[in-house]
Amino acid sequence: MKPTSKRPDPAFDAALALHRAGKLEQAAQAYRRILKLRPGHSGALNNLGIACRKLGLFDEARLCLERASVNDPQALSNLASLENNLGRFREAAVAAQRATELMPTLAAAHDNLGFALFRLNAIGQAHQALSQAVALDPRSANAWNNFGQVLQRQSRLGDAAQAYRKALELDSSYDLAASNLLFCMHFDDVWTPEQIFEAHVQLGTRFERSVAGQGVKYLRMAVPHGQRPRVAFISADLCNHPVSMFLRPLIAHWPHHKMELGFYSSVKRPDESTSWFEERADFWCDILSMTDEKAAQRIAQDGVDVLIDLSGHTGDSRIKVLAYRPAARQMGWLGYFDTTGMQSVQYLLADAVCVTPQMEHLFTEKVLRMPDDFACFEPPAQAPAVSALPALSNGFVTFGSQNQLAKVTNAVLDLWAQVLAQEPTSRLLFQAQAFNDDAVLQRYRAQFVERGVDLSRIDFLPGASRMQILQNYGRVDIALDPFPCAGGTTTCESLWMGVPVVTLLGDRFGGRHSASHLSAVGLQGMVAQGARQYLEIVRTLCADMQALSQLRSGLRDQMLRSALCDGPRFAYNFEKIISSIIASQAGT
């Protein structure tokens, strides 16, 4: 907040006092009264923008901050923060860059610039901006959290975890940093599944304790006679996001005659996918501007019978809404690959591959299993045609990986180096968004050299559009899956482009996605139980080019005929599970 100036200003001081007391609506009214008399009052404009942002009045917030930001670095930084919050990262970067030019020592401006650049995938520049932010203000929890996200994207997992922990040391109630730390732990094999579980329970318990006794709870246990149960999804990813491509097959075949369909959306930048979901909903509510408590109250008032969270501990999640227990039955599914850690979420939807009975102790929820895959894939409509096997014309096999770099750990590099040594004429196409950062690229090049790999055998590709990623599979014969966190969307897209994926069955939900998808398509033989079998599967595939070529040419049709792409079958099985939950009267 912009404080009062040296010149006496009783009206502004009174508004500021209301603001500092947390009386935002009263403070906003007071600022508006000042601006009626003095439209150019920079302090009132800046602070009204801050208050409106917290009140969810984003258009008014932007208008105020834009008016206040003329040559005012603090207002420019606040404007950048708002634009980041709304997913307008290019606009945020412009405002934050101008703020740093006007006031190079303003840590918040470097923080906002770094986050905007991170979301624009300018990883090297983001790293530089956030390094400056934490140097200028080492006590900024927000800057440390954002720095952690950049380090994680660079696959510096230990450093990322340390940055998240630093943020939590500075602000123990910083929920986003805590969730980011949980998410980061899945990629790093230094953490056991049991340690990851305990960390989830600790955070889930904290979430629930923080809202205990606040009076929000579901209003009905049983579905009224003659009415359809109300089933709703809560998510920030109802847009052009990987979650949507796995959700759409279910929604396209939703049994409206048996269950009402609802959404609680916190999408920052709605797009055509958002509209698609809204058009198919029986009820829809935008909760982006609502507090968690207000959103929970709305869900309870709407009489939702089953509430399904699609985000877990991922970015922009509203998982804390479920801690209020606004629905009698609550479940996690799809957008996160682990437990919520909360007793208020009774169910987790998985399948027999991703979560075996021996793994159930790693979940606070009761694990429910789809009979096939836990998800259903919507193939990309504009995907290129499947090409002929590149090896037939090249005379050598090309392996490929286009997963996010955080998944490619030292152990993965060790195994891939063995793959390349085993197939001495082969090449590797290695694409990652983080290779836009030259420092990251050079680090990975050096790691392959350390493992005795000739760099002339590797094509390092920087970040690319989804269409370019799909086109890249035209150069790949066999995809190599990382671990301990396996591919999900990447695996499905690879299969759609005719490229088989060799995966190592992991010890955690997130390490078994590829195995689930491969099994659903009938490619269980691509799932290795250990590193030795991983190498053997690769050797077998490379030994018979004609068989590999036939597999490639028929894989798209095989996938289309499989449970992985069978929307009606998935919707039927999903409805059976939801009906069983309701019939059991669980959650009392």
Image: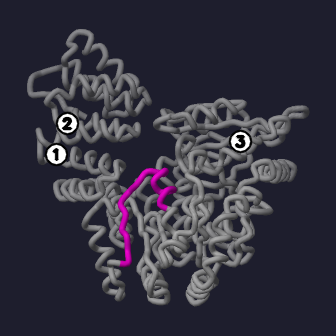
- Which comes sooner in the sequence, label 2 or label 3? 2
Report the span colored magenta.
457-472
The three-letter amino acid code for the residue at tag 3 is: Ile
Place of residue 447 in the rendered image (x, y in percent of width and height, measured from the top left): 33, 80
The residue indicated by pointer 2 is 74
- Which comes sooner in the sequence, label 1 or label 3? 1
Residues at marks 1 and 3, CA–CA distance in whole angstroms: 47 Å
Residue 265 to residue 247: above or below = above
Of the pair 509 and 413, the residue shown nearer to us: 413
The three-letter amino acid code for the residue at tag 2 is: Gln
The label on residue 106 is 1
- Under circle 3, the secondary element is helix
Going 18% across and 56% down the picture, which residue do you hit? 132
Going 16% across and 54% down the picture, which residue do you hit? 136
The three-letter amino acid code for the residue at tag 1 is: Leu
The residue indicated by pointer 3 is 251
**Is 466 contained in the magenta span?**
yes
